[in-house]
Amino acid sequence: MTAAAGPEGYELSTDPARVDRDLVHRFLRDESYWARGISREVVDRCIENSLCFGVYRGPEQVAFARVVTDRAAIAYLGDVFVVQAHRGRGLGKWLVETVMADPDLQGLRRFLLGTADAHSLYERFGFRPLANPGRMMEIARPYEGPEE
């Protein structure tokens, strides 16, 4: 479990018990462009099956990221966000920097992510467009259905 002190009294933790699942669900469902409409059940399963990183100010969670990985060859970074009231303080950069330095994520052959608007942030850490996008394929199923 990783714990680190950050700027302005913020703290980062990988303790899954600290994740504010209500906050993560609400943000992903209502504010994200990539998971709009996601159910709480899916968010819970995502958290339970990923390496999660939370940024906290005291007991309040203010940022989140998760990595889906086998901790040996491949990882996918997703659901990275900083709540609006805490943006502009370098927390997103610090969060991604801490994710990339995590001991379980070193020496991976491939580290993937998707972004519509944060390319410059991720490029600082070595992310580039796919070298051969013709090799990559996907099944895309947007979140739909009644909400809780």
Image (spheres, grey):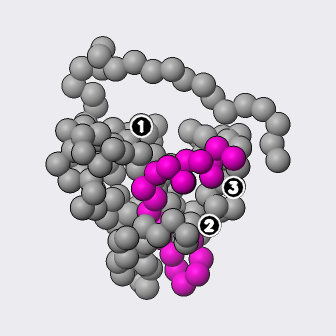
Q: Mark 3 points at which residue?
A: 26
Going by the numbered disc 2, the residue's amino acid type is Asp
Identify which residue is drawn at 22% across, 25% down: 131
The magenta region covers: 41-61
Q: What element carries label 1?
A: loop
Q: Is residue 2 magenta?
A: no
User: Going 41% across and 45% down the picture, which residue do you hit?
Assistant: 68
Closer to the camera, 46 or 136? 46
The alpha-carbon separation of the residues under discs 3 and 1 comes to 20 Å
Label 1 sits on residue:
114
Q: Nearer the viewer, residue 30 or 40?
A: 40
Q: Determine the residue positioned at 62% across, 66% down.
A: 20
Mark nearest the camera among 1 and 2 is 2
Give residue 28's position: percent from left, percent from top.
62, 49
In the displayed structure, does residue 71 sit left or right of residue 23? left
Q: Give the alpha-carbon distance from disc 3 to disc 2, as whole Å.
A: 10 Å
Label 3 sits on what residue type? Arg
The secondary structure type at the circle numbered 2 is loop
What is the x, y in percent for residue 26?
69, 55
